[in-house]
Image (cartoon, helix red, strand yellow):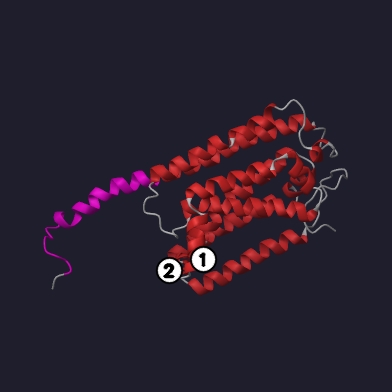
Amino acid sequence: MQWWCAAQGVAWDWTWKPYPGVWLFVLALVLSYGALRRRAGGDASARTGEIASFAGGIFALWAALDWPIGALGAGYLASAHMVQFLLITLIAPPLLLAGVPRRAYAGLAGRRRLHAVLRWLTHPLIALPIFNAVMISTHLPAVNDSLMVSQLGSFAIDFAWLASGLVFWWPLVAPVPERPWMHELLKIGYLTVQTIMGIPLFFYLTFSRFPVYSVFELAPRVHGIGAHADQQVAGLIMKIVGGLILMGAVTVIFLRWSRREEEAPGLARRPESRGDVTDPVSP
């Protein structure tokens, strides 16, 4: 029995296979979140949204790591491997971060060393290069072919993806460290830059004349899908689906910004409209 999805070189079939390492990893995250919630507390309305967000992130992560996507992406199809990448780096992390209780984030401010590390590590000018360095290095044929053939190597790639995804999304989702200068326009620019940064890998996968990954080229074929065509689909998935995810996030940021700007003048005029001209704090 395998504990983590890795390339095995055996013919693919749709028989379900257990991966206990994946289950334990996901269970550890859920139990850690439960302990965090018990310590942090919070109001019921916020709790519902946070739990729903975290549950969505856990589901995306589980779907990417477990059978069948995890098994297909580990040693059969480059396209499934790319779906894994998008789920682990662009879908799961922002949902997981949004699910963290605000009181838990506030507690980080009191831990000076950790706060200082987070301030540096999650600075947009640091987070963006880290994410792209992981993205590019883990998609290099030498790295991919060397690591995907072992369970520990496959786990290392998956963990690196998740860690880099959390670092990438942290300055957009997490409220700590505070960055008042991180205006919505900068957030939109941050995400837009990332759509551009992914273009070289898209071109490399889509327009290479031959398959670049031995682990997928030599793998038993799944329903007759050719290795080269599968690799081209992987590049298209990265460009189209990845771009839609990032542009979806841009849209959410823009709509929230627009709504806040529309509500701000009304809030500013509200005391005057009631004739409340006295200082509300004065006796």
The residue carrying mark 1 is 114
- Looking at the picture, tell me which residue is in the foreground, 181 or 11: 181
Q: Amino acid at mark 2?
A: Asp
Q: Position of residue 32 (x, y in %)?
A: 60, 68
The answer to whether residue 101 of the structure is visible from this angle is no
**Disc number lying in front (1 or 2):** 1
Magenta segment boundaries in residue numbering = 255-281
Q: Position of residue 14 (x, y in %)?
A: 81, 46
Q: Residue at x 76, y 39 (%)?
A: 77
Say left or right for 198 vs 62: left
Mark with earlier residue (1, 2): 2
Q: Quadrant of the N terminus?
A: bottom right
Say left or right for 126 vs 31: left
User: Is residue 66 one of those drawn in magenta?
Assistant: no
Q: Position of residue 202 (x, y in %)?
A: 63, 33
Q: Amino acid at mark 1?
A: Leu
Say left or right for 154 vs 92: right
Q: Position of residue 201 (x, y in %)?
A: 64, 35
The residue carrying mark 2 is 43
Q: Main secondary structure of the magenta part?
A: helix
SS at circle 2: loop
Q: Which mark is residue 1?
A: none
Distance between mark 1 and mark 2 Cα atoms? 26 Å
SS at circle 1: helix
Mark 1, other Cα within 10 Å: few <14 / some 14–19 / many ≥20:
few
